[in-house]
Image (cartoon, rainbow, N blue to C red):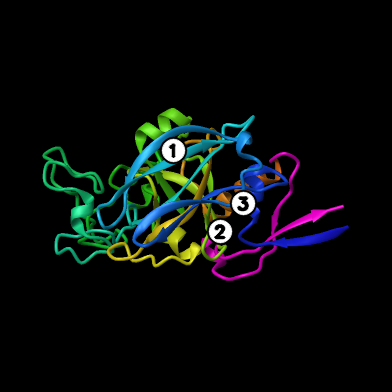
Amino acid sequence: MRKRTIHSMILSGFLCGPVFALNVFERSMGELRTRQLSSSCASMRSTLLDIVAWDRDGQHFDVPVWQLPYSEAFFFVSGMAIDADGAPNAYNLDDTGLDELANAGAPGHWNGVITDRKGSPLIQQESDPFPGYYISCTSLADETKEFTDPTRYVDASKIPYVVLPDDVAKRTGARLGDFAVVMNLRNGKSSFAIYADIGTLGEGSIALADALGIWSDARRGGAADGILYVLFPGSGNLRPRTIEEIQREGEKLLSQWDGTKPVFSGAGSNDAALGSREWTESTD
């Protein structure tokens, strides 16, 4: 038996079988363009839909969402904006939280914090993790906990999660709580994640950005392009998960893929956030 250590190529090979192909977005002369690494397996995937996304400069571009053959799994490549929702110190009245208060909404239209019946943001009490801060929420929540419990929601600073627009989730069959694997194509770092919030295409939690080697500052960080997202509709149970569960279930999903049994070798650092790892595939 021999072992191959696979870095940034592993997910590309995973997506297309023995011969890998992937559309990678690159920034050249200020514009996003698509570079076709290989076309030998183009027939093995089909486009589900095209999403119009915007970069930080306000420029829009199309993001094709691909579905894999004989599978519900789908993938796309885009940038990553940093989502702080669910972190107990995400937002406060003084706008000194992890993220800009404007990203939580505005009076009458709050979406990143929970509110009372009058529409005013609820504030954490002395027994909560960050007294005086608003209670930030995610679409995925632990229904066994009280609505006003900050730990009911998925903490962006601790749990690697991805965000999808509601229409994309509906058309692909993705449900909150489903699992994902995300790779930074620029440095080869990858992480398992969970679909935990509804928003715009190409968003990830602070913990996910840390695991991928992306500047995780929710106010100024993120990546313009080059982030590969693979999601597995129907793989979750509609509930938040621990890091250990995300890791374990993610590995199961990959090991079941077309007989391939990729395993994380444990190389790299940042284990607490499912951080930088190498992939090792054993072949006879």
In what element is the residue under mark 2? strand
Circles 2 and 3, Cβ within 8 Å, touching? The answer is yes
Task: Using the image, tell me which numbered label, if any, was put on residue 269.
Answer: none
| Front position among marks 3 and 1 | 3
Q: Which residue is mark 1?
A: 176
Q: Position of residue 33 (x, y in %)?
A: 42, 52
Q: Is residue 205 left or right of residue 242?
A: left
Q: Which residues are magenta?
A: 257-284
Q: Position of residue 210 (x, y in %)?
A: 45, 65
* Residue 141 visible within the image: no
Depth check: 25 or 8 in front? Answer: 25
Identity of the amino acid at label 2? Ser
Q: Position of residue 190 (x, y in %)?
A: 56, 58
Q: Which residue is mark 3?
A: 11
Q: Is residue 34 left or right of residue 41?
A: left
In what element is the residue under mark 1? loop
The correct choice, above or below, for 127 with respect to 153 in the image is below
Q: Can you name the residue that lies furthest to the front here? A: 29
| Front position among marks 2 and 1 | 2
The correct choice, above or below, for 242 with respect to 266 in the image is above
Q: Position of residue 252 (x, y in %)?
A: 66, 45
